[in-house]
Amino acid sequence: MYNHQLDTFIKIADLGSFGKAAEAMYISSPAILQQINLLEQRCGFKLFVRSNHGVKLTSAGKSLYEDAKTLIRLSEDALNKARLLAESSEHTVRVGTSLLYKCRLIPEIWAWISERLPELRIEILPMAEYQNRSNSFSMLGIKYDMWEGIYGTGGWKGICQFLELARTPICCAVAKNHRFAKTEKLTLQDLNGEYLVMPIKGVSEELDAFRNEIIRNHPTIQIIDSAYYGIDTFTMCEVNPYILITQPVYSDIHTNLVIIPLETEYTLPYGLIYANEPTIATQKLIATSREFLNTREISALKAFQLHPVSIPATDNRA
């Protein structure tokens, strides 16, 4: 991780002698001298003032001495962190959670899995509310092994894997003072002349098809693109007469908005989003989750208005 000539350099500085350092490190004095000569050549400046009474650090040497100890400590910390990660990857699954990616179905599945794989552990970690999806996915497989949420069938292929647990319908959300707030159900015809907030193109094949239907059959509907759904998106729809295209599963997020079912055939996939190169523990969790779905239905689906799906024995769709 670092140039081990620094170990020799620090030992000489601590003992004030090439001979004493050689004796302490169980190597010859010529070998010690050669290492320091090479290190000084690499640095481009002298590290020691040498005399018959021993050696002393130069000003530059003193600076390197302090920084070298820090570098070695950081290197050891990095190795220990990586070592712990390698050891835990066989038994621990790190699940990220955030505003959009809450653990809604995982607890029920995990209760079933833990009975069958008692050696497997799950660690819930908070995710920052990133301003774009690329930042979120840059942490997948590094800081988090997976998270739960709606999968982008258009823009996320190749950057993650996905196990579909359910389908979530498309619906509308409006401010409580909106004229549609007390409406029980909406159609696209009802939305003519309205402003519709929805995800940008390319994220979801289903939403892109939905968008095309609006453009083709309802040209008076004005679409406002949102690169990322977050607090600012929900607030914008609270203070403006906009209609947010959302899903019932998000009703526990934008609590100040009223959710209204929309008559449309489109649904979005909901499930476990995990790294392209899953850890051994993640592979176990995914495989056992498939077993769960093949033997029973998640009881929490109804609470979030999710529709059950049929899961094949193997599903490596990304």
Image: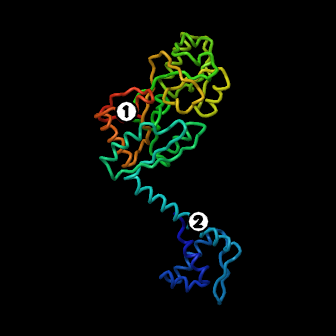
Residue lying furthest right in this view?
Answer: 59
**Label 1 to label 2: alpha-carbon separation:** 52 Å
SS type, badge 2: helix
Q: Quadrant of residue 55?
A: bottom right
Crowdedness near tag 2: few (<14), some (14–19) or many (≥20) residues, C-alpha within 10 Å: some
Q: Amino acid at mark 2?
A: Leu
- Tell me, for residue 287, which label it has, or none: none
Mark before the other along the chain sequence, 1 or 2: 2
Residue nearer the viewer, 9 or 136: 136
Q: Are marks 1 and 2 in contact (CB under 8 Å)?
A: no
Residue nearest the viewer, comparing 275 with 233: 233
The residue labelled by disc 1 is 299
Tell which residue pokes out farthest to the bottom in this image: 52
Q: Position of residue 291 (x, y in %)?
A: 30, 38
Residue found 40% across the figure and 26% down from its top: 307
Return the x and y of residue 261 as percentages of the image width and height: 50, 19
Left-right relation of 162 to 132: left
- Closest to the camera, between mark 1 and mark 2, is 1
Mark 1: which secondary structure? helix
Quadrant of image for the C terminus: top left
296 on left or right of 15: left
Label 1 crowding class (10 Å Cα cut-off): few <14, some 14-19, many 20+?
few
What kind of residue is marked 1?
A: Ser
User: Which percent across, then down, holds residue 99?
Assistant: 55, 37
Who is closer to the viewer here, 229 or 215? 229
> Which residue is label 2 attached to?
71
Identify whether 60 is placed above or below 269. below
Q: Position of residue 88 (x, y in %)?
A: 41, 55
